[in-house]
Amino acid sequence: MNISDKLKSNPAALWSAVVLIACALVALPFVLAMAGTTWVRVTNLAILFTLLALGLNIVVGFAGLLDLGYIAFYGVGAYTYALLASPQFNLHLPFWIILPIGALTACVFGVLLGAPTLKLRGDYLAIVTLGFGEIVRIFFNNLSQPVNITNGPQGISRIDPISIGNFSFNGSEVILGINFSGPVKYYYLLLLVLIAVIVINLRLEDSRIGRAWQAIREDEIAAAAMGINTTRIKLLAFAMGASFGGVAGGMFAAMQGFISPDSFVLVESVMVLSMVVLGGMGNIWGVIVGALLLSFVPELLRHTVDPLQRSLFGRLIVEPEVVRMLLFGLALMLMMLFRPAGLWPSKVRRRELAEK
Amino acid sequence: MSALLEATNINKRFGGIEALSAVSMRIERAEIYGLIGPNGAGKTTFFNVLTGVYRADGGAFTFDGTALNVKAPHEVAAAGIARTFQNIRLFANMSALENVMVGRHVRTHAGIFGAILRGAGTRAEERAIHERARVLLDYVGLAARGNALAHSLPYGDQRRLEIARALATAPKLLALDEPAAGMNATETATLRTLLERIRDDGTTILLIEHDMKLVMGLCDRIAVLDYGRKIAEGAPAAVRNDAAVIEAYLGGELA
Amino acid sequence: MDTFLQQIINGLTLGSVYAVVALGYTMVYGIIQLINFAHGEVVMIGAMVAFTVIGWLAANTTLPPLLIVLIGTLAAIPACVAVGYALEIFAYRRLRNAPRLAPLITAIGASIVLQQLAMMIWSRNPLGFPQIIPNTVYHIEGATITLIQIAIIATSVLLMAGLTFVVYRTRLGVAMRAASQNAQIAGLMGVNVNQIIAATFMLGAALAAVAGVMVGTYYGIAHYTMGSLLGLKAFCAAVLGGIGNLAGAMLGGMLLGLVEALGAGYIGDLTNNVFGSNYQDVFAFLVLIAVLVLRPSGLLGERIGERA
């Protein structure tokens, strides 16, 4: 019996735990702000990456399809938002219209990519998705001619922040005598979205479609014999994962106010994959832990290792960016070699991978 | 009433090899129909053609009164034919219960939005899936093993779990590919009782099996394949004494 | 100037590089069905090591240019062989029987680690190729070909001939082919399969080293990020030709080079300048997707049954 099982059998303890965690999450940005607003921003990006990791987990973890071009959907969502809410085309649609459009557009791209390729064997599919990701980025980079759509490598700036009526998520505001900075407001918004996405993931996992995904991951032939239309169900996983990526991309564009093709390179796809692998493919809580770890640890290192190097050697020997990349690379390698089921594997994955 | 499955002149070639030539058979409702023959006689090929893994080169199937026109394996289950595999293919890392629940996929409808919104309809369907899966686990004698991961079950249990999973698709025809392979005598006896019960509850069974004792004791009728041709068909007693059958089996073994 | 002939020449040059790199992918895939995703990084390491040596020799000695390039290449080969061997031993061997995606994920990790290590050693700045080879240009029928292009094409032809000899005329080659047919049986027949796999990695890495020098010399620079895109394109070439098939890798490499060069040369005209040559990198991936969807076994590959 682990902790969660104990809690389930004791409703009072469960509820007090929930309340405690909720209070901690509400107070968190103010605690972080004491260390500097940067940390609130770091947290916001960490939540964004958690959203991405949860989306990719549907494709990689549940359905067992390795997608190496996942960041393309994030990019499609981000560009959709940027084009519909910036001076680029002088469009300023409200976010509650754009985010669904972004999700839908990303979803369409997911289907376009998946429909012809989902018959392929796993490793080929991985490379094709990677190629797709690169193609999308090349288009972001070059669709400034002959008609300027994406503004090329310069990217799109002055993107509208998310706002509801007169309430904008940008800039500070004093509410009830408490000063809420822009990042703090985005934090709460992201937290809400994250909770929604977690709930959706948990529900998907434990549903008819979720079981079909897992069945395909386990044995595609047997799944087909059970009447599962494997191509369709795999496409559904692709579309679902892509939509999540699209939403996260839209939030990213709104939050940063600026996007360029550089944010959607292959390395970013690999980063999200590392998060999923580190946490344990297919395990929602594990993936969240993986995403948070790989978002925060590099930042912590940046703030500890850099000063340390400077004081020891008088100069920077290993750049923080290098440390970050090495972490991702090593996470992928070492996890697959020594803990293939992830740091926090689901009971299922743990047994499966230990056996092979 | 018409036969449940009627195969007419089924042909299947692999390159130059005629794996099935003009095989015809009629499987009546609520019978156990055995398909036997020496190794390489075409039993599994027939099975694979029937279940959509291969496309027949000629001939036609009529199933439950209508032409069976299968373009992909997953359509077979929807039509009402469920199968098991010669070398067990369970969803190894899902629980026994989940395995059977997957079998309900083809008879249920909840989609992505149902799963996300989890409205009353979806919840009711989930409950029904769950309940049906429990009933079927109990039916095959695995009521206590619902939470065990499929691959952790003993061999005989895995075989029966595969049958429960197939039954979950509510098939009219249950096609079993050597279900007794590798079983000991006790397990085979349990299996035999189970199959008789499935038939008596109204589900027709097509059985490929090597265990002659089981086939002869269990089947209502038997067809014998040899080199892709049907050489005999009839009640076990008749088939057992058929000269061609004896020739095929003994001739093959003595040569 | 004749665009068509010119793009053919450019395409053959690029294609020569792709072909040599593709051989590394295809040999490894042929034996253990692994996409050695880090192979492109091995090419990069080769270019970096060679350029370091070449740069030093050019600055501090008066050796003839050809000898300098040769010494640089000879220095790069053992470095790449060591990296290839290390990849096999540390990253892949443990995962020989793991689910197919596990070694691929490891390979992606290894590729990032190699890139970062290269960056730490050689910094973010590209290494330049010293001006030691005369930039002689020959004119044929309105098109031009440089001495370097001729050298690249000739070298790749030599390498391919050499590899063909190794694979079809030596004991190692026989063992490699046996292991790619059926590693288990080859093992029973007395082939030390692990050794053969390691040898395959090393052979591929040696080719990668030379390819690194070729491509670096062609563009005049070597950079720690040069490997990934090159590697991917070479992989596309291997798939185009039929992965696991040596002749396929050579053909696929040349074809891909031609497709890219002609595509880049004509896309502007064909699309009324809506798309320009900056879409050059898209072609390889389009070819990859088209091949995998239409004929996954590639041009020369045999159809492999997917289903049990």
Image (tube, rainbow, N blue to C red):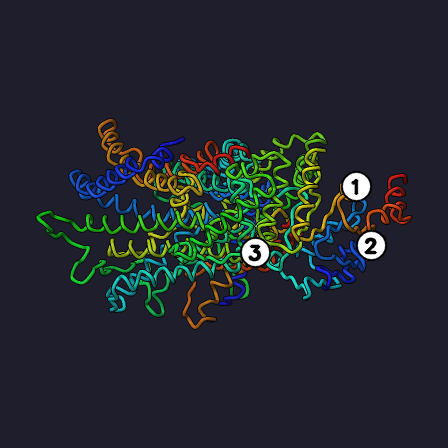
User: Dot 2: within a 10 Å radius of its alpha carbon, few (fewer than 14), some, or many (20 or more) residues?
Assistant: many
| Nearest to the observer: residue B157 or residue B236 | B236
Q: Is residue C261 visible?
A: yes
Q: What x and y, as percent, mark residue A275?
A: 38, 42
Q: What x and y, as percent, mark residue A347?
A: 46, 36
| Nearest to the observer: residue B213 or residue C239 | B213
Question: Which numbered disc, 1 or 3, marks the residue closer to the eye?
Answer: 1
The Cα atoms of the two marked residues, 2 and 3, are separated by 41 Å
The Cα atoms of the two marked residues, 1 and 3, are separated by 46 Å
Circle 2 chain? B
Q: Which residue is mark 3?
A: C292
In this rendering, the answer to whether A217 lies above or below B53 is above
Q: Which residue is mark 1?
A: B212
Q: Is residue A123 visible?
A: no
Mark 2 and mark 1 residues within 8 Å of each other at the beta carbon: no
Q: Secondary structure at mark 1?
A: helix
Q: Is B240 on the left-hand or right-hand side of C182? A: right
Q: Residue at x 30, y 46 (%)?
A: A47
Amino acid carrying label 2: it is Lys
Circle 1 chain? B
Q: Which residue is mark 2?
A: B230
Mark 1 and mark 3 residues within 8 Å of each other at the beta carbon: no
| Nearest to the observer: residue A348 or residue C33 | A348
Q: Residue furthest top?
A: A312
Q: What x and y, as percent, mark residue B212?
A: 79, 41
Question: Which numbered disc, 2 or 1, marks the residue closer to the eye?
Answer: 1
